[in-house]
Image: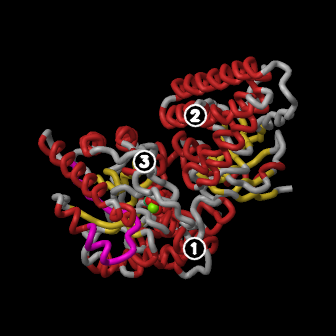
Amino acid sequence: MTQQLRGVGIGLGIAQGPIARMAEPLPAPDDAPSLLGVAEETARARAAVSAVARELEERGAAAGGAAQDVLEAQAMMAEDPSLETEIDDRLSQGRTAEWAVHDAFASFRETLAAMGGYLGERAADLDDVAQRVIARLRGVPAPGLPDPGHPYVLVARDLAPADTALLDLDRVLALVTSEGGPTSHTAILAREKSIVAVVGVSGAEALLDGHTVVVDAAGGAVTVDPSAEDLERAARRADARAAAASAPITPGALADGTPVPLLANLGKAEGAEEAVSLGAEGVGLFRTEFLFLSAATAPTIGQQREAYERLLAAFRGKKVVVRVLDAGADKPLAFLNDAHEENPALGLRGLRALRASEDVLREQLTALAEADAAVRASGEAADLWVMAPMVATVEETVYFTALAREYGIRTAGVMVEVPASALLADRILAHADFASIGTNDLTQYTMAADRLLGSVASFQDPWHPAVLRLVREVGAAGVALGRPVGICGEAAADPLLAVVLVGLGATSLSMAPTALADVRASLLAHTLDDARHVAEAALAADDAASARTAARAASPTHREADQ
Ligand code: PEP
Ligand code: MG
């Protein structure tokens, strides 16, 4: 019988196929005393850890891209000196290498998990490294990908980066995991490789090899043993998506010609080429903190200038919106967030953290102004806009925009991620040159639901009419004051929600470059009047699910597709 499971969809794809499950992890070793002695066990443990670290590096080099960064980080974690000390402590008590590795990694994992945020999500990576080391010690193959001999939907507890890097994209039709949130490695790599994925699916543990599923990332759903009609509808949507991907790249616009520039969210300049090839008309969000996540001390002006120069040079003649460091909560930076906070999402983060270390902010603005000048001196300039994250008050807006202008930044704006600033958007936009709505945090704060926590993921839905009403406030203020209002949260990557956002007054949309084709196609199928009508329908709903349904019913294209 057909059954539907829910999770967090990554991207917008849809795929169908038979399940093949990932092999279960190795059983934990017994805590039996070693028969070999401390010296021999130590030598075995060291050799196994270093062999696994080398293997991870080799896999990384073969995979390239984001996978390489992830696997190199894992190799470094495996050889972390404090982890080695933990292993040695256990070996010196006469334990086997297998048990010492298992127990030391588990304790290190707990420490990381307790840190929460980005590092907490990395904790799962340690399990994979430990399994690989123990498998090597036992002389058995490491748990890995299945090979059923035909294309399949891969179902796993969570995917280790080492496995994701090796996914054969001709064979793996989609990914379903029972664990992992929207920022897990499975999610990050699925996004990068455009693999259809739904993560954090409760009930996925019970899925059986060979059963057919439809994996619908846009709807965050996995349909088990689908009906013939379900399969047909999924195939139609997959075809429509493939057609959108191969449509000619044109500037973002509605069906009536209203321009809606489509921009890229980037974390490093290296992504520029791909973004341009996918049709990005500029950058709507450059997350500068991604450049310095592992830095212990503040980056120098020179280091920053170099990174910004590369970015601006890649987008000569185009708009580039750079966000100053957004440190704290899910993205802690050691040099800005040193105090322990019980609720870091509500703490000294974003602009608040920068203000507490104003020299860091001043240095960043200096580096941005210098990079802009250097690019301008060597040819056509990029149109540099700079904005501050997590702005909650008019006073913060005045502070930041005045400071940015002091450094010669011509266009200074703020991110609207806190309900307070959405509600006061008319006052805020009286001072800022533009606003950019970060729907990820705006949803988190409106719904009081931690964006990293799988257990409250159902609340983290930007379709919620409460979130949409706040977007409407900002859009209306932008129209009244003639100020641009961009969207740079994940919501902009949802093709129908993108239409709603434009209907609410958004003037540009910024997203992961892989989402551009779907959003471009969806905008082209709606006029401005349609967009306003679809937005009204969503606003009038009681909750996120009914807003989605109402918007589909009000949209000419989606109505047809649903029939
Ligand atoms: C957001 O909050 O929507 C946003 C774009 O910023 P980040 O996801 O980096 O917090
Ligand atoms: Mg944010």
State yes or no: residue 388 in magenta.
yes
State yes or no: residue 7 in magenta.
no
Mark whose residue sits in front, 3 or 2: 2
Q: Position of residue 479 (x, y in %)?
A: 30, 76
Say whether residue 195 is visible: yes
Query: What residue is pinned by disc 1?
Result: 447
Q: Horizontally, is 376 left or right of 343 in the view?
A: left
- Marks 3/2: CA–CA distance: 22 Å
Query: What residue is pinned by disc 3?
Result: 290
Q: Tag 2 or tag 3, which sits nearer the N-term?
A: 2
**Residue at left offset 29%, top offset 40%:** 303
Note whether 15 is above or below 355 in the view shown: above
SS of the residue at dot 2? Answer: loop
Mark whose residue sits in front, 2 or 1: 2
**Residue at left offset 47%, top offset 76%:** 533
Q: Position of residue 421 (x, y in %)?
A: 39, 76
- Marks 2/1: CA–CA distance: 38 Å
Q: Position of residue 320 (x, y in %)?
A: 29, 52
- Residue 157 occupies which quadrant of the picture? top right
Q: Which residues are magenta?
A: 382-400
Q: Horizontally, is 5 left or right of 383 in the view?
A: right
Q: State yes or no: Cβ of the residue under disc 1 lies below 8 Å from any atom of ligand 1.
A: no
Q: Which image quarter is the C terminus in?
A: bottom right
Say whether residue 248 is visible: no
Count of residue discs: 3
Near mark 1 (Cα within 10 A), the count class, few <14, some 14-19 or many ≥20, is some
Q: For the residue marked with disc 2, what is the amino acid? A: Asp
Q: For the residue marked with disc 1, what is the amino acid? A: Met
Query: What residue is pinned by disc 2?
Result: 80
Near mark 3 (Cα within 10 A), the count class, few <14, some 14-19 or many ≥20, is some
